[in-house]
C-alpha cells in the first residue's frame, strides 16, 4: 500500500494558498496548484478555533480517507490543500457528506 504524499513544510502550504486556485464547498475549501511532478501532494489545514484536537483530527481523517478513495481517478501533478470551512458545523458531518463535498469540488476543479 502506497502512502499519500503530503506537503509538510509551512512554506509549501503557503505557496499553494497564495498561487493556487481555490474552490469553495459546503464543508471544505480546496486550493490547487500545478507542481510539475508525476504525483499529487496534499496538505490539510484545520484551524485551532474549530475545536479541540479530537475534533480537528477527526476532520483530518475524514478528508484524508476521502482523498485516498478517490485519488486514482484524479489527474496527477497537483499540489492540493484542503481547508475546513470555519462556518461548517462539526457535529453534523459524516464520511458520506465529506466524500460528496470533496468529489463535487474535484469535479468543479476539472481534476477528474
Image (tube, rainbow, N blue to C red):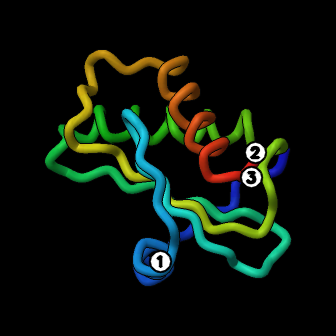
Give how far across and how far down residue 109 sits, in percent.
62, 52
Q: Is residue 104 left or right of residue 22?
A: right
Q: Is residue 49 left or right of residue 42?
A: left
Task: Measure the alpha-carbon separation of dots 3 and 2.
Answer: 11 Å
Q: Which residue is mark 2?
A: 71
Viewer-proximal residue, 18 or 56?
A: 18
Give how far across and how far down residue 102 sits, in percent.
56, 37
The residue lying at 37 percent from left, 35 percent from top is: 27
Callout 3 secondary element = loop
Q: In the image, which is nearer the foreground, mark 3 or mark 2?
A: 2
The residue lying at 57 percent from left, 28 percent from top is: 99
Residue extending farthest left = 49
Number of marks: 3
Q: Which residue is mark 1?
A: 9
Q: In the image, which is nearer the foreground, mark 1 or mark 2?
A: 2
Give how far across and how far down residue 107 sits, in percent.
66, 42
Badge 3 density bin: few <14, some 14–19, many ≥20, Cα 10 Å? few
Q: Going from the N terminus, do you reach mark 1 or mark 3 first?
A: 3
Q: Quadrant of the C terminus?
A: top right
From the viewer's perspective, is residue 63 above or below residue 34? above
Q: Going from the N terminus, do you reach mark 3 or mark 2 first?
A: 3
The residue lying at 70 percent from left, 54 percent from top is: 4
Give how far across and how far down residue 92 sits, in percent.
31, 16
Callout 1 secondary element = loop
Viewer-proximal residue, 5 or 53?
A: 5
Q: Are marks 1 and 2 in contact (CB under 8 Å)?
A: no
Q: Which residue is mark 3?
A: 3
Q: Is residue 7 left or right of residue 46?
A: right
The residue lying at 72 percent from left, 52 percent from top is: 111
Q: Going from the N terminus, do you reach mark 1 or mark 2 first?
A: 1
Task: Measure the alpha-carbon separation of dots 1 and 2.
Answer: 22 Å
Badge 2 density bin: few <14, some 14–19, many ≥20, Cα 10 Å? some
Amino acid at each position: 500500500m502506497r502512502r499519500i504524499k503530503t506537503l509538510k513544510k509551512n512554506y509549501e502550504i503557503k505557496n499553494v494558498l497564495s498561487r493556487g486556485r481555490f474552490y469553495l464547498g459546503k464543508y471544505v475549501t480546496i486550493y490547487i496548484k500545478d507542481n510539475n511532478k508525476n504525483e499529487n501532494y496534499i496538505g490539510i489545514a484545520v484551524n485551532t478555533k474549530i475545536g479541540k484536537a479530537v475534533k480537528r483530527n477527526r476532520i483530518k481523517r475524514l478528508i484524508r480517507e476521502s482523498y485516498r478513495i478517490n485519488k486514482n481517478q484524479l489527474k496527477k501533478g497537483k499540489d492540493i490543500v484542503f481547508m475546513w470551512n470555519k462556518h461548517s458545523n462539526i457535529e453534523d458531518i459524516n464520511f458520506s457528506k465529506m466524500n460528496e463535498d470533496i468529489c463535487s469540488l474535484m469535479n468543479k476543479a476539472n481534476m477528474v
